[in-house]
Amino acid sequence: MALEIITTGDGSHSLLNHELNETYHSVHGALRESLHVFIKHGLSFFHDKYAGKDIAVFEVGFGTGLNALLTAEEAAAKGFTVHYTSIEAYPLEEAVWRNLNYAPEPVQQEWFARLHQAAWGEPVEALPRFYLNKLKTTLQTVALAPASFDIIYFDAFAPSKQPEMWTLSMLEKVVNALKSGGVFVTYCAKGQLKRDLKSLGLVVETLEGPPGKKEMVRGVLPVAP
């Protein structure tokens, strides 16, 4: 892929995919977007409700590895364990991820490298309290066991760029993989997405988006009686 490292509004990097004319993260702030959408309204939201339990995360789009790094840092800071499964059809080359500025401190740099260097298709304890299973595959072909994840990070490219990722059948596939009480979170706030998630049984919330974006979406699967 033709990728270019760009600097976003908060000083953190993103990647511009020239083939899709789409960025991996918000141009208004890659770090702020990931912290707001996936950590604050996904991981922390769930942990605050179910403190003390291990958390299983499924991420659609490993991409730059930013969400994984922030999740590992949050787990280490708050003392809980994460089992993190992520899919990526086009893993980044080392020459690209080595130049991303998400890890300014030496310890962060080591963690970021360990996430990217972890073997594909082989669950490993990549970091303290962080078990990583990276799968080089697509959402269309990956096998997801029912009720196996607490949180879905749905971080695919935008519906206008990758509409095949946002179809009802793809959403149904990941929602079926949620455990009772599980959380689906994404930066996208399209009306069709919200209607589809509601049709799949999620309680859908439209939340304030990260800087530069008005809204985002979180869906929660009701706890089974």
Image (cartoon, rainbow, N blue to C red):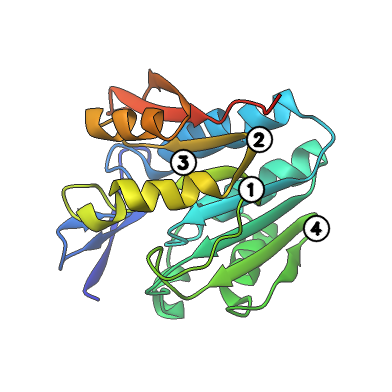
Which residue is tagged 2? 180
The residue drawn where x is 38% and y is 44% is 30
Q: Are marks 2 and 1 in contact (CB under 8 Å)?
A: yes
Q: Is any atom of residue 104 visible in this view?
A: no
Q: Nearer the viewer, residue 69 or 160?
A: 160
Secondary structure under badge 2?
strand
Which residue matches tag 3?
34
The mark that comes first in sequence, 4 or 1, is: 4
Location of mark 4 (residue): 128
Q: Earlier in the sequence, mark 3 or mark 4?
A: 3
The three-letter amino acid code for the residue at tag 4 is Pro
Q: How far separated are the C-alphas under marks 4 and 1? A: 25 Å
Badge 1: how crowded within 10 Å, few (<14), some, or many (20+)? some
**For the residues carrying marks 4 and 1, which lies nearer the camera in this image?**
1
Closest to the observer, 132 or 117? 132
Pointer 4 with pointer 1, Cβ within 8 A? no
- Of labels 4 and 2, earlier in sequence is 4
Q: For residue 85, which quarter of the picture?
A: bottom right
> Disc 3 marks which amino acid?
Ser
Q: Quadrant of residue 63?
A: bottom left
Q: Nearer the viewer, mark 2 or mark 3?
A: 2
Quadrant including the N terminus: bottom left
133 or 224: which is nearer to us? 224
What is the number of the mark on residue 164?
A: none
Q: How far is disc 1 from disc 3 in space, using C-alphas?
A: 25 Å
Whole-angstrom CA distance, mark 4 to mark 2, is 27 Å
- Residue farthest front in this picture: 225
- Look at label 2 and name its amino acid: Ser
Amino acid on which the number 1 mark rests in the picture? Ala
Mark 2 or mark 1: name the one nearer the start of the chain: 1
Q: Which residue is mark 1?
A: 147
